[in-house]
Amino acid sequence: MRTLIRASAGSGKTYALTTRYLELLGQGAEPEAILATTFTRKAAGEILHRVLAMLANRETPADQQSLAGFCRSLHRVNISTIDSFMIGLCRSLGDLLDLPDDIAPAAADDVRVQAVRRMAMDRLLTTPDDQTDAVVRALLHGPASSSVVGAIEPVVSELHQVYLDSREESLWTPAPGPRPPAPNDVATAVAVLRDSAGKAPVGRQVADGTARLADHIDAKDWAAAASHKLLQNARACGTYCRKPIPPDVLDACAVIDNAVHSVLRAEWIERTRSTYDLLRRYDEVYAGLAARARVMLFSDAPRLLAANAGKLRPDLLEHRTDRGIRHMLLDEFQDTDPAQWAVLSPFIHRCLAPEAGGSLFCVGDVKQAIYGWRGGSAEIFDTLEEQIPGVEVATRNSSYRSSQVVLDAVNAVFGSIDTATPLAECSGDLEAWARKFGRHEAVKADLPGYVALTVSPRDEGQGGSRVEACVDWVRQIQRERPDASIGILTRTNAAALQMLDALRAAGVGASAEGASALTDDPAVELILSALTMADHPGHTAAAFHVARSPLAECLGLPPDPRTHPGKVATAAARLRRQVLDHGYGRALRPLAALLAPHAGPRGCRRLSQLLIAADAFDRAFEPRPGAFVTTIDEARAEESVAAQVRVMTIHRAKGLEFDAVALPDLDGSVRGRHRSVLTVRQRPTDPVQAVIMNPSPGLRSVDPDLDEAAGRAQTQEMRENLAVLYVAMTRARHALHMFCGEAALGKATFTGIVAAQLGAEGPGPGLAYQSGDPEWWRSLSADTAHTDAAGWECPEHIEMRPATSAEPDRQAAPSSREGQWIRASAAFSRSAGDAQQQGLALHACFAAAAQMGSEAASPAAVADRAARIEPTLSRTQLALAAAQAVQALEQPGLRAALSPFKCGAGQTVETWAERDFVAVTPEGTVRGRFDHVVVLKEAGRPVRAHVADYKTGEGPAGAAAADGQAQVRRYMVALAAMLAIPRTDVSGALLYVGTGEVVDVPSGSAG
Amino acid sequence: MSPQIIMLGLQRPQTQAVTDWLEDRYVHGPVWDMSSALVVVSGRRAVRRLGQLIADRAARLAPTGGLAVFPPRTVTVGALPETLCPGLAPALSPMASLIAMAACLRDLPAETLNRVSRTHSDGKRDLWALAKRLCALRSELGADLLSCGDVARSNAAAAGPDADRWAALAEIEDAYERSLRVAGMRDTEMARREADPGPTDPAFQQLVLAGTADLRPVHRKLLERCGLPVTALVAADADDAAGFDELGCVVAQYWLQRHTDITADQIVYAEAETDAAGAVLERLQAWGRELSADQVTVGLGDEASEPLVERMLTLAGVPVRTPLGGPATRSRPGALLSGIADWLHTGSVEALAELVRHPDVSRRLRRDLDAPGDLPDLMDRYRTRHLPGLVATAVEPDAGRFKRLTGDLRRLRALLHRLSGDAAPATWAARFQGLLANVYKDVSVQRDQPDDAHLLRALTVTGSALEELASVPATGPTGSRVGGAAALQLVIDRMAAEALTVESAEPAVEVVGWLEVPADDAPGLVLLGLHEGRIPSSVRRDPFLTESLRSALALPDSDHRYARDAHGLSAALAGRSHVALVCARTTDQGDPLIPSRFLFAASDEEVGARVKRFVTGDAFRLARTPLASSGPRRLQMVSPEGAPPVEKLDPSSFRRYLECPYRYYLRSILGLADARDDWQELSPAMFGDLAHAVLSDLARSEPEMRESTQAGAIRSLLRERLVAHAAGQYGRRPMGSVRLQISQLERRLDAFAACQAERNAQGWRIVPEQTEAGLSATMDVDGAPVTIAGRIDRLDHHPELGYAVLDYKTGKAVEPEKAHRAKRGGALAWTNLQLPIYRFLLQSALGTAEPVGVGYVMLPDDPDATAFAMAAWTDADYASAMDCAADVVRSIRQGLFWPPSTPPSIDDGLQRLCWDRFPQRPAAIQEAVPQATGQEKQA
């Protein structure tokens, strides 16, 4: 089965894909054999959830079994984003792609990616490097800008991805322009122009023209010359100001045209090459830093895979990925980019091979192809029919979402888009768009609907009245139908923010998605000031800000920090230390808690988001607080609760729907922005053939090839913008209200086109168009009600039962020394490590000697036995310790301390060496290890005991001697408790094995 | 002797049931002696918990003492081989193995390596990364007593498309092992795979496997050879006996079919991850009457959610302990070593700036110097003045103001000395230890203080890593010399693998990773993150050991993980009085999550209901987070206070006040300043200052030069002065961007030279004595004098046209009129008084009757727009400007600094203080009523 579905908005793409998935399961396909991809995680999850829901809604035992089987295979289900699929492939093929094992994929706006980019730009520009100098110098040939970063940064941020798609130098090396005419010929041509300007028959206008053109050439203003009408007309029609251009002027123009063309093209080639060189150098730095940070972009995955396509044999892919994919279900296919296609294509062909018995099900809508800016190529979708022989194409234009009124407006705008007056000059380019557009029909014919276009007066300033009109409409709906969902969709984040501010100022509770800066609250700013001060103690503005806030006391800042720089430095160092000790998340928590009572509900939400961001930042571990501040300054955060009125960009709204949609930001041109570079491909699925800088108007006018290439790009951009308009209009279930400024009418703007197509270019400001029921909400059924169950209100403090007294964790070790100061360097210093090792070795050797008793004659034997006790110690260490132990044991005092009891009649002696114990004493449970214990028993019952503790450090005069005695006393208490004998019957001693000294610890003092 | 299996049942938590068994088995009268037993448990936490339970049990058995308790030796599965058979140790440490592997790779032909990994685009290969990857592979195979050679020879690999790669891996492994054998060395894998484990430690008479459901062949081999009686304690009912093999390890097929013990009422679906953490709080509140904090454990399927849970609990006032800990690199010693590595790698001033901010370094330097801790500030000032890039090419901070910085940096460099070049690993260890000893030599800590304990633990881990480096044999394949940065990286990598867990005795909710949950025995359990890939965990995609290869080689595969976790879940639920299993539907970003298979491992009839509940049922949602405030915002902008006396003002004060009185107050009255050091290039002000310096030199040059009508001559002088000033300020080899900016400035100066020559030709002459000269004059405002003092950039004189006061402008080419006045409410209003004030100063200073014009020397980015732009103001205009100046003086005197104006478009360092980004700023300004402001006084 090979199916390609062209599914218009709201026509049930996901439903179709899910149904197909269930069909395959029903036919016995294993979940791991079905790959279903889409573009967002949300959409992938929706597909999975729908599959689950549809299976769960079936009632027969066979269906129940099928659901149970599917649930058992959840880990093998291949429903994912295309990014995730590609990343999985990269992980499996890491060795072939030169990827580290622990590489982490990240989105372009991820903090780690941003940090790497910043660092790369920094390194590129700050490290002295003659080659980079030369490249940048070449790019700075225009104005003598005082900012190099300002000139370079936009180039790099816009074009790095383009470079990654086309790294070959040859792709950035355009063919040279025409050979320039000899200087003399140009001089002669200029003379002809000047000469003709003085001649009467050419007329005043022509004379002015020839003189101006000559001036441009003399001033070497090639761009102005290229755009000069005389030169253009000389090339095109031979007339100027409706008069024929004299032959000698025509000849001169031809020479000048050639000169202009060759100069401008040479400059353009140089700019292309310089741009390439800059990008290459930047990428070298970036790639190194990204590899060090173990970060890769999601978009890098298909690129890497496509670049290594030759090595990725199908059998290898199948083996490495453990995926015998036989069925492919591809959603939103119009957004596939060429690299992704290069990776998917072999899988598709393998599935469709006769022996595979597989299938392809592809769903998409080129009318919704709005991701061209990130590489998506809707044309790939169009070429599928050629590439997949026998593919069946189906079209779905019935909408389950929108009312017919809304769809009629969509039909009116797009059904004959090629005839839209404002787009008359590119009707040819849009003819295919219009031809493929099928009339949209509402499945639910009785859905109430309303469409309107309101025009605001020309002198509205910054779009103020459009915004006001939009706010009024939203308020009206909220008043009449508070449960209706409303989407306010804009083209830019800035416009979304403007709308959000206006709504809030009007008292409308709205949430913005992806538009708000995390720093837009004073509470967050205060914490950032504290961190700024931590990084820059000389930033007195930051210190002052904090000093006059609820944070001052906690940070130890005086009210006037300017006069106490020492205190600021101390506070800054303390905060830096807390960040290093606990991470940003934990270090900032007490500050946020201090601010919360002062911050208000909104501030608290923002503080919560700041703490989340801090926890995330901790994964990167950047010790300098300034790095955190920079990241947060650039961070955006969603409103934590999506309100009934949601403001977002149209791109974000893809996949969503609302009862009512307002479009207040459609006055921009559909011709789109100016791209810096153009990528040229023979066919959409082919690799890039060339990358060229977008030619200037001047160069375009003298270079027809470049003009055509730039024109193609412009058309492409326009199609994508029309897709944006289509997506925006089709988000509405019932009501769609568009707002435009009068100035946008009649032009190739979004609203200009809408107005023209709806016949709404009427007389001045006001409601220019409406259809349907303006009170559409009245006939809205109750089930549209947007009901949100109230969530759980977490109390400020959660009470739990107090802990019971007998806490196991309170068990103490005899050697614990609470409250004692120790040197930090003891934890790592070589001598400390050695001493610790020596101690371990000596303990092991004494234990070994005790175990061996009289056998312990030779140090070698002791060392052998000790090796079993402490296997991690080296033989050399043990041999040295064994020699020392044997020597020590020869000393009478020490021997006596180890054998304190003489057995009488009926008495026995038991010795414990290096023995772990647990003792329950009246003071609590004690756990530890005895070095050496001797128990005297009578009739098998303990009557006396002696505990000896080895000390390998300094002698009894040392500073630790008192600690040692206290420790032995605790051992004695424990021993008495274990043996159930009076404490007075337990003796103890400290054995200084280095000096052979023995210090008795009296029994009476035990406890 | 065949092992004995004991089914502990599911009535009690696993670790408690193990304790019961140990009591039954080993208590004899007044002695509970388990010292002959080696108890093997699943993880470190289980070791600790079993010890605690034994002590607890001892207290219960003999509350007044009288019981001699000798606990068993308890180890994790990982430590079993070397504990049981001491003969297996010592093998090479992992660090030494890595060094040996890297050395081996260096000696192998490129063709062999090409079969295993590709080179970078520059033809180079990261041998350390490859060595790490191969060591990890050996370690994973080693647990199953396999080598790469074994895999290469297996049917699964030999017949597959990766056969050649496995053959190459086997060759590399052979070469590596050969190099070790020649040197008389062996690594852990060789020791475990090949060597005779030697005799078992005689201290052990009994081996107890307590909840170790996942033993690998290396353990099985040892158990077989040791000859000790083995008892496997299995936390399961007898009905599930078929689910375990003879050592109590799970039988995958059994657990794949078995339904879980989860009941529907234990499942909590939450909307998103934060809601899921909120569900933990909700459960704690619900259980709070019956359970104390230390009686609840929170298990995490995804340890990355630890900060979220910890944050929520802490903010809700619930004591929480998270023994999971972060990697040891996230610590003060970790940051110090990473900073040094960065310094060694880049040699940049930026790396040095990071080091001077390290609290331990700055404390060390401060102590040496006995000076205030302003090194970061000094460094900021130095960087702002000189914009150094690399330390090697930076301007020496030896001028007077940076003298102290020089001393500090010298000390810092002394700390870092001897870190360059190649040396043996042990030598590096000694050097790093010396450095740390120097930094921490006077630091004392208290073990029981949480912060100190964290530092101490971090230093201990650092010490262990350094010890490991120090113990790398100096001969054989590990004897090669390495660079300081590479050696440091080995230490850092080793630290990254170690978690900084700090124990605490305070009763608290404990947050543990999923693998530790089965051995936990708190009565209450909230298990968070029941999602596929977490619980059950999945095998990570691996370019070497694919799922099918794992299955073919009987390595742990997904089915094995499922079985292990299914049994783990069953054990985790055993004997708990309170259980909640939380599964979020989506991430906090709204991306759906895949639920755990365990949630649906029920009867066919039950599955449908559970799936429906997951997909469409109510999900827990948090309406109010712990960090919430129901009250209104009480934070306010800092109010200006008082009316300062105004005795002296400079010409730009007027502009600053007119732009925003509040910012003027902060900047000029309070004297607040910003600071930064992230300079990528000269700021516009620095660029302007450099231009000023060069142009001043022209004004002060000999008459034949400054009055020259030859553009070339002027250009030469300007270029020469530019080179000299730039070198003095930014060094002979400044940052790349600065070099480019200097050349941009040169282009502007070239254009200026032509303009200047033309001006000279017009008869204008620079008045050198008034160039950059300080001028002051007194202005009488309401009978009180105020001194205006300023410095004009340049004064020109023309015998017929009089004087021209000129100000250099390197910013946008804006005419004086536009730069000074704007339309406000339909009328022109002064926004800047700089040029009129200059004129006032000059007229006061010279007392001249000649006309005095004012204007800009514009050196904009478009060299063609370079020009002398004179203001065309009339006397009335100047008079109105001075009136405006008097108004400003009055306003300042009255303390009129409120309200703030619209924020500037760029960050001036005051944006946080001025709430510039707060959408409700206008309302906040209206709300705030500054105390004792001029408005009130006026009223």
Image (cartoon, rainbow, N blue to C red):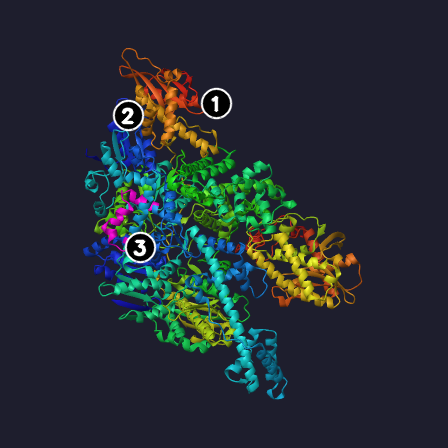
Q: Position of residue B494 (x, y in %)?
A: 40, 42
- In the picture of the structure, the residue carrying the numbered disc 1 is A958
Where residue B791 sits: x, y (%)?
71, 55
Q: Chain of mark 1?
A: A
- Taking the view exactly as shown, the residue that stands out farthest to the bottom is A201
Q: Is A682 or A393 nearer to us in this picture?
A: A682
Is B280 situated left or right of B670 in this image?
A: left
Q: Amino acid at mark 3?
A: Thr
- Where B286 falls versus A268 (above or below)? above
Q: Give the crowd class for mark 2: few <14, some 14-19, many >=20 residues within 10 Å.
A: many
* Helix, strand or loop: magenta stretch: helix
Which of A719/A527 is in front? Answer: A719
Query: Element type at marker 3?
Result: helix
Relative to A344, A120 lies left or right? right
Proximity of marks 3 and 1: CB atoms separated by less than 8 Å: no
User: Which residue is more in the foreground, B714 or A654?
Assistant: B714
Disc 2: which residue: B32
Name the subunit of mark 2: B
Give the extent of the magenta segment: B135-163
Q: Is residue B924 magenta?
A: no
Instruction: Label 2: state its secondary structure.
Output: strand
Q: Residue A704: give x, y in percent of width and height.
A: 47, 76
Q: Is residue B512 visible?
A: yes
Asked if both marks, 2 and 3, belong to the same chain, the answer given is: yes
Q: Which residue is mark 3?
A: B616
Q: CA distance from mark 3 to mark 1?
A: 72 Å
Nearest to viewer (mark 3 / mark 1) = 1
In front: mark 1 or mark 2?
A: 1
Looking at the image, is mark 2 or mark 3 earlier in the sequence? Answer: 2
- The three-letter amino acid code for the residue at tag 2 is Trp
Expressed as whole percent of the image width and height from the top left, the position of residue B266 reads 29, 45
Amino acid carrying label 1: it is: Gly
